[in-house]
Image (tube, grey):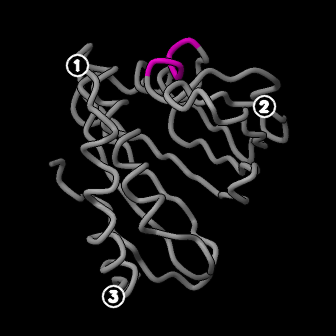
Amino acid sequence: MPEVTGQVVETPEGRDLRLVRSLAVPLEEAWQFLTDSERTALWFGEWEGDGRPGGAIRIRMAFEEEAPAAKARIVACEAPHRLAIETSDEMGSWRLELVLEADGDDESLLGFVHHLDADTDVGAVGPGWEYYLDMLVAATEDAEHPHFDDYFPALIETYLERAKHPLAG
């Protein structure tokens, strides 16, 4: 079973789900895995549309064939450090932020934040983000993909507990 790495953190605006991943690629290459459709397809899904701040894109999740494409608006795209998007689909609206920093010459550190709405089910979204971020790590290392069944439902209870007892921000 994968390790639960995400934390639920109280913020002045509500709560955030925060996860961190170390990527074995330099900063500029890591940025491509977050913004280039061919590379995002390797771990999350391909996208099409206007990827500039204020632009709209549609994301088709690669490993959820039945799911319709999600609409997203680019809130910020500050290469090669910060990408913020807002999505909307049948699951609701999500505000996501990805921040990259160099970790030496050949690695990068990704901070991922899902700004949670009051009714967001952390037990459902936490395991999903663990899976997709581990997919990103596997894509950057050209390694075997993890299996979703190892994350969901196995990590639900831990995330529900973390949601009951969020950390101070």
Tell me: residue 94, above or below residue 16: above
Q: Is residue 159 left or right of residue 93?
A: left
How crowded pointer 2 is (Cα within 10 Å; few <14, some 14-19, many 20+) is rated as many
Q: From the top left corner, tell me how far across and down residue 58 is, in percent.
A: 76, 30
- Gap between marks 3 and 2, in whole Å? 35 Å
* SS category of the residue bearing label 3: loop
- Gap between marks 1 and 2, in whole Å? 28 Å
Q: From the top left corner, tell me how far across and down residue 59 is, in percent.
A: 68, 30
**76 or 1, which is in the foreground?**
1
Tell me: residue 11, above or below residue 58: below
Residue topped by disc 2: 57
* SS category of the residue bearing label 2: strand
Q: Residue 63 has which mark?
A: none
In the image, residue 41 lies in the stretch drawn in magenta: yes
In the image, residue 135 lies in the stretch drawn in magenta: no
Dominant secondary structure of the residues highlighted in magenta in the image: helix
Residue at the location (62% across, 21% down)?
46
Mark 3: amino acid: His
Mark with earlier residue (1, 2): 2
Residue topped by disc 1: 144
Which range is magenta?
A: 38-42
- Gap between marks 1 and 3, in whole Å? 34 Å
Q: From the top left corner, tell me how far across and down residue 38 is, in percent.
A: 56, 11
Q: Residue 165 has which mark?
A: 3
Q: Is residue 31 left or right of residue 90?
A: left
